[in-house]
Amino acid sequence: PSNGGALYPRATETRDLRTLDGIWSFRPSPADPEFGYRNGWYAQDLEKTGSVIHMPVPSSYNDVGEDASLRDHVGLVWYDRRFHVPPWWQTAKQRVWVRFSSVHYAAEVFVNGKSVTYHEIGHLPFEVEITDVVNYNTSNLLTVAVDNTLLSDTVPQGYVKQIIDFDKVRQEQTYTFDFFNYAGIHRTVFLYSTPQVYIDDVIVNTDIQGFTGFVVYNVTHKGPTTEDVLCLIQVFDKSDTQVVASNECAGLLEIANARFWWPYLMNPEPGYLYTFRASLISRRGDIIDTYSQKIGIRTVTWTNTTIYLNSKPLYLRGFGMHEDSDLRGKGWDPVLWVKNFNLIKWIGANAFRTSHYPYAEEIYQLADEYGIMIIDECPSGDTDIFTQSLLNKHKQSLTELIRRDKNHPSVIMWSISNEPRSAKQQADAYFAEVVKHVKSMDLSRPVTIAISQYYNTDRAGQHLDVICFNRYNGWYQNTGDLNYIVSKVVEEATEFHRRHNKPVIMTEYGADTVAGLHFIPEYVWSEEYQVALMSEHFKAFDKLRQTGFFAGEFIWNFADFKTAQTITRVGGNRKGIFTRSRQPKASAHHLRTRYLSLAVAD
Ligand code: GCB
């Protein structure tokens, strides 16, 4: 695993950048995982060791073919492509890096036949320096072996069974979460350069007093130095005017009459961002390295009833989402996500949860720009068996998540799990430890779990700052009956607050709905039923809002998404208020009316 600062790769005056996205060669491995290794698939072009298919990067590989065996493949697949490193990178003594923004689930990377890194846990970036193994005068071979197998000690967990069918052996993968276990090189692959001495990390925290914004920062560097390295820190406003500067590599900046980062619709100018530019300077005054990123000045605070942004009480209105779309599965797609954000704004939401894993970094950058708040969830899914090895990986996923997302103003809360079996005895010590780990890295944001166990059996809530809960009244409970919803939702939220004395959010409720299916009176799976079920929840939320401890509502889900095949899903989970192609169901219009009216009250 990488141990660097995980800065998002950017080209600057001192750094170059190119992407390795495009069409790669691809071949699934036979069931024997050693087969490709024994036959040297990592050391020659895949094209030369057998037949290949074309595979787009970034994308999940599952849905681009016509073959169920590719969609349902369990185990290793191999990817490769060639790339050139510009010779001037060598002349300029640049270090050469390759960075994978996400490969699900595990990846071993080879350059010119040499193993250069291994990374486990999807949805998180990893980078490795490859200066010593690349050629400048000829092309280089980049090979990636990807394994989608989920076991009892992977994050998320899954189970694999060996199936013997006459003379054939195959693996069958099952898992407890319902979204499809898409796999492959899911996000952009970057080839980039840095100087020998380079900025490794930038950590920014912000505070507000009156009209003044404070930026507490720390810029760290790596690489051999014979003399002290100085820093030049500059902050620019939106019109590129420098508002403050410093020569300290770590310190406190004060911005008088600062523009603060506000959530969408809470302020006429939400998502105000400054540019924070850090440069390393030699004693002679030369610029050694420069890196820029956007920052927002805002505070997140919380009490036992309320979450505040810039000292204003927050009421979160949004949804759980997925990285999911036709053909590309979980592949990063700017078209999809600009559309998603336009729909989020259209509907008047101010937040979403990155259920149930960290999303592409570009999505957080867009959320920063638009003022959309994020509950940032680590890779998680219904943790069932609490072992030490799982705990270690769970902590590792949070280390990598916080390292990646710590500077985003949009990230206002960490979700350390979705629907763990938190009624189990071991869940208590397990989550105490996970929360302690998060707090050792970041004290500036509250920690939560989307709880599915009932308040009288859950053991994780006591360790959290904010209680989130998921419940499907009128769907999985009392199917087809809307009468219990108001009382059940009010009771559950009230009891969670009474026991823990913390703000409470409903992070999931909803009903599967086939777009175009209509029934009067409302009947399960119809658009009318989804709307009616929402109306009952709205009544409950309005009652709860008067209690003072209820901090938000998130419908499940933003859009329909793919699941494993079961008889409870029609082509996937249909709880979206948008279809998978992002067209509104009646529920989207219904939600819009509510969210826009809530926005007026902000
Ligand atoms: C849940 C899970 C979510 C599922 C949802 C459902 O509780 O958190 O991942 O998709 O229920 O629709 O069953």
Image: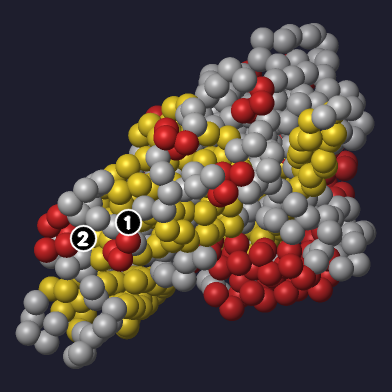
Q: Residue at x 74, y 19 (%)?
A: 570
Indicate the amino acid at tag 1.
Pro
Q: Label 2 is placed on what type of residue?
A: Arg
- Residue 584 position, x and y percent, is 56, 20
Is residue 132 visible to the viewer in this orientation of the structure?
Answer: yes
In the image, residue 329 sits, relative to residue 311, either above or below, namely above
Give the quarter of the image for residue 155: bottom right
Q: Position of residue 350 (x, y in %)?
A: 52, 44
Residue 292 in view, yes or no: no
**Residue assigned mark 1:** 9
Question: Quick check: marks 1 and 2 in contact, CB under 8 Å?
Answer: yes
Residue 582: image x %, image y %?
53, 23
Residue 186 drawn above or below residue 571? below
Secondary structure state at the residue bearing disc 2:
loop
- The residue beneath circle 2 is 15
- Depth check, front residue: 33 or 258: 33
Q: Which mark is residue 96?
A: none
- 298 relative position to 428: left or right: left
Query: What colour scheme does the image use?
Result: secondary structure
